[in-house]
Amino acid sequence: MNDRSQRQEQWEDRTDALLAVASLAFLAGYAVRILGHDLPQVWQDVCLAITFAAWAVFVVDYVVRMWLSGLRPLRFVRSHVLDTIVVLLPLLRPLRMVTSYDKIQRRRDKARLTLYVRVMAYAGLSSLLLGFASALTVYSYEYGAPGATIRTFGDSVWWACSTLSTVGYGDVSPVTPGGRVTAVGLMACGLALLGAVTGSFSSWLIQTFTREDEKRPPGDFPGAS
Amino acid sequence: MNDRSQRQEQWEDRTDALLAVASLAFLAGYAVRILGHDLPQVWQDVCLAITFAAWAVFVVDYVVRMWLSGLRPLRFVRSHVLDTIVVLLPLLRPLRMVTSYDKIQRRRDKARLTLYVRVMAYAGLSSLLLGFASALTVYSYEYGAPGATIRTFGDSVWWACSTLSTVGYGDVSPVTPGGRVTAVGLMACGLALLGAVTGSFSSWLIQTFTREDEKRPPGDFPGAS
Amino acid sequence: MNDRSQRQEQWEDRTDALLAVASLAFLAGYAVRILGHDLPQVWQDVCLAITFAAWAVFVVDYVVRMWLSGLRPLRFVRSHVLDTIVVLLPLLRPLRMVTSYDKIQRRRDKARLTLYVRVMAYAGLSSLLLGFASALTVYSYEYGAPGATIRTFGDSVWWACSTLSTVGYGDVSPVTPGGRVTAVGLMACGLALLGAVTGSFSSWLIQTFTREDEKRPPGDFPGAS
Amino acid sequence: MNDRSQRQEQWEDRTDALLAVASLAFLAGYAVRILGHDLPQVWQDVCLAITFAAWAVFVVDYVVRMWLSGLRPLRFVRSHVLDTIVVLLPLLRPLRMVTSYDKIQRRRDKARLTLYVRVMAYAGLSSLLLGFASALTVYSYEYGAPGATIRTFGDSVWWACSTLSTVGYGDVSPVTPGGRVTAVGLMACGLALLGAVTGSFSSWLIQTFTREDEKRPPGDFPGAS
C-alpha cells in the first residue's frame, strides 16, 4: 500500500463519523420540512439549510477524495460508482454501513458476508431508503391536493409498501403530476432492486439447501445409530 | 455418532409427537379466539391460555435441546436457524413435516426429495401458513373498523391470496394501522418466499425437460421402428 | 424397440386424431354451455353430454395405454405426468400439440425446439388454456350475482388477463365464493407457469445474445473491410 | 469479407441516417395524429401520410437488403429477426441505436457493452417504446369513451407505467374493447421484456460484486497498512 492510498485511508477514517452525521442530518432535515408543514416558516428554512449543508459536506468529501486519488475525474467516477450515487442522492449514504460492517468483520478475521447476503443487504437497504424518501416526496405533493387519496403520511408509507411489492391495491394512489412522476421513479428503481433481493434470496436458499446436503453424509441416518 | 448426539436423537424422537400437537393447539387456539369473537369471554381466555401454553412447550423444548447440544447459545442459534424461527413463530412448526417426510424416505432407502422440490415444499408451506396467519390477524383488526372493506373471514382469505400473488385487486384492503402493518409483513416475507417457489418451479421444469432429453436417445424415433 | 412399445405406438397413432377432436369437443361443449345460458334447457343438456363424453374418451384412452404399457398403475402415473394431468383436466390436451410438433420436426431430421423454447411453449400454452377456462368458470359464477363487476364474458377475459399478468387493476374482480376460489386456483397455477415463461424467455434472450457474440469473430469489424 | 457483404455494408451505411429520420417521422406522425385530435382534418391526413410513407421506407429497405443478401426470403427472415420485427413495428427502430453504439465502440477498440448490459439496453428500450406507443393507442381509444377513467394523455402514460411495473393501481384503466386489447398486448410483451431487464440487472449486480471480490486480494486490509 503506497503513500497515496495511505492518505486516502486516513481521510476516509477521519471523515467517516462526520459523513454518517451529515447523512442523518440530510434525511432528518428533509423529513421534518415535509412532515412539519404546519411549522412556522423559520423552522422550515432551518430544515432546508440543514439539508443543503449536509449535501455540501458530501460534495466536498467527494471532491477531496477525487483529488487525493490522483485519478482523472471520469475514471474516478467510473471506479467509485457507489460514492457517486451517494453524492447525487445523499439519502443512500446508509448503504455505506454494509461496507463498514464488512470491513470490521474482515479486520476481526471473521468470515465476511457471502455474496448473496451482500447483494440482499445493499439492494434491500437501497429500496427501503428509496421507499421512505418516495413516501416523503409523494406526501409533500399530495397532502393538500383536491381529490387526493393520500392524506396522511401513514397513507403515503402504505402506498410506498404496496408499490414496492408490486401489489398495488389502488385504495390510495397519487393524483398530482409531481406525485406520479415520483411514483414512476420508485417503480423503476425499486422494482429492479427488489427483483435483485428476491433473486438473491432464492439463490441463497438453494445454496443453503445444497450445503446442508453435502454436510450430512449418507451414513448420517438417525436410525442407523 | 457419539453419546451426546444419541441423547439428542432420543429427545427429538420422544418430543416429536408432543410438539406436533402443541403446534396444532397453537394454531387452533389462535384461530378460535379470533374467529369466535362472539364467544363468551371465558372461552376466549381458554383459547389464549392454550396459545401461550403451546408456545411455552416450544420454548422449553428449544432450551433443553440447546443444553443437550453442549453448544454455546449463539452458536446453537446460528446452526439451528429453522428451529429458532419456529420458536419465535410457532405457526411455522408444520415446516418440520417436510424434514420428517424426508427422514422417513431416507430410512426406507427411497430417493429423497430433489433440491428444487424441497425448496418449493419449504417455501410454499411457509407462505401458506404465513398467509393463513396474516388473514387471521388482519381479520381481527378489521372486522369492526369503520369503513373497512374486509368484513368476513372469507374476505380476509381472499385479500391474503390476492396479496401473496401480488395481484392486489384492491376491492378489499386493510384500513386500520394494525391491519396495514400485518399486510406489509406478509408482503415482505410472503413475496420473497413465493419468489423462491416460482424460481424453483422454473428451475425444476427446465431440469425435468433436460432429463427427458437425455433419456430419449436419438435412435428413439417413432418412425424408425 | 420391442413388441410392447410397438403396440403402444400403434395405439397412439390411431387415437391421436380422435383425442384431438375429443379435446376440442370438451372445450366447445363447456364454452357453449356457459356462454349460451339463454339457450333452451335441451341444448344445455346436449353440451353437458358432449363434455362428459369427451372426458370419457380420455379416461378410456388412459386406461388402455396403462394396460398396454404393462406397468403397475402407480408407476405409470409417475412416468406419464403430462398424460395424467390431461386426464384430470382435458382442456390441457392441446399441450400435446407441442409434443406432436416436436416429433414431426424430428422425423424430418430438422432441429427440434431448443430447451427454453419448449418450456415457453408448454408453460405459455398451459397458462393460456387455464386462463380461458378460468374466464369461462368465473363468468358462470358471476354473471347473475348481485353487485358483480364481471357482467359480460369480455369482462371475464379482461379479468383473467389482468390476473395472469399480476397487474390486477381491480376494476373487475369476482365477488362470489365460487368465482374467488377459481381465481385463487388461476393465481396459483397461472403465476407459477408464467414465471416459468418469463424466466425461460430471459434465459433464451441471454443465450441468443451469447451465441451472436461467438458467431461474430473479433475480425468482423465493418470498418476493417 | 466478400463482394456481396461489402455491398450490403455500403447500403447500410448509406441508408442509416435516412432510416433514423424515417423512424422519428413514423413516431412523430403517429403521436401528432392521436394527440392533436382537435386539429383540422387536413393536418390529420398529413400525419397519416407521413406515418405510411415512413413505413414504406422501412419495407423498401428490407426488400433491398433481402435481395442484396442473396438468401432465400425465409432464411433471411430467420437470420434477421430484429430487422423483421422493426419492419412490422417501425416504432422499435430506435433499438438499432444499441447496435450502432456497440459498433462505434468496437471501431474505437474500446470494450463493448457486456452481455447483461446489452440485454438490459435492448429489453429496457423496447419496453419503453412499447409503453409509449401503447399509451398513445389506448389514449386514442379512451379519450372520448363514456365512463372512461383515462381522460388525458398524462393519465394514459401513468396507466402504462403502472401496467408495465405490474403494480396496477386500477385508479385508471381502459374500458373500451380496443383499449383493453392494446393493454393485453402491452402486458404480454412488456412483462416478458421487463422480466428480462430485472433478471439481467440481478445477474449483472451479482457479477459486479463477484468481480469486486476478486479484485481486492485478502492482503488489502485497511488495518494492515
Image: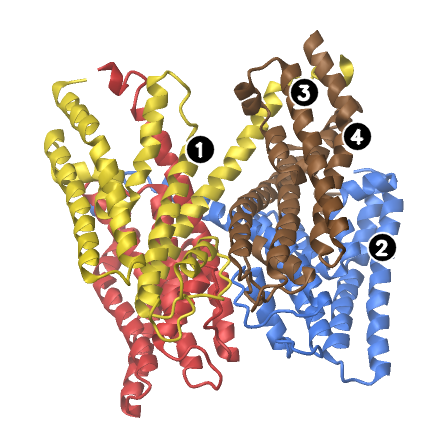
Chain colours: A blue, B red, C yellow, D brown
**Which disc, if any, is residue D17?**
4
Q: Quadrant of the C terminus of chain C?
A: top right
Label 2 and label 3 in one chain: no
Q: Label 1, on which residue? A: C117
Q: Give whichever of discs 3 and 4 has the lower sequence position.
A: 4
Which of these two is toward me, D8 or A58? D8
Q: Amino acid at mark 4?
A: Ala
**Which disc, if any, is residue D64?**
3
Q: Tell me which corner region of the image, top left, top right, bottom left or bottom right, holds residue A153.
A: bottom right
Which of these two is toward me, C213 or A207? C213
Q: Are marks 1 and 3 in contact (CB under 8 Å)?
A: no
State left or right for residue B139 relative to residue D77: left
Q: Label 2, on which residue? A: A61
Q: Amino acid at mark 1?
A: Val
- Chain holding disc 4: D
Q: Residue at x 65, y 25 (%)?
A: D62
Classify A25 as above or below C107: below
C-alpha separation, residue under disc 2 versus residue under disc 3: 58 Å
Label 1 and label 2 in one chain: no
Which of these two is toward me, B129 or D94? D94
Q: Amino acid at mark 2?
A: Asp
Q: Amino acid at mark 3?
A: Val
Task: Give the secondary structure at mark 3.
Answer: helix
Badge 2 crowding class, 10 Å Cα cut-off, few under 14, some 14 to 19, many 20 or more, is: some
In this view, the mark in front (1 or 3):
3
Badge 4 crowding class, 10 Å Cα cut-off, few under 14, some 14 to 19, many 20 or more, is: few
State left or right for residue A175 relative to residue C184: right
- Chain holding disc 1: C
In this view, the mark in front (4 or 2):
4
Badge 1 crowding class, 10 Å Cα cut-off, few under 14, some 14 to 19, many 20 or more, is: some
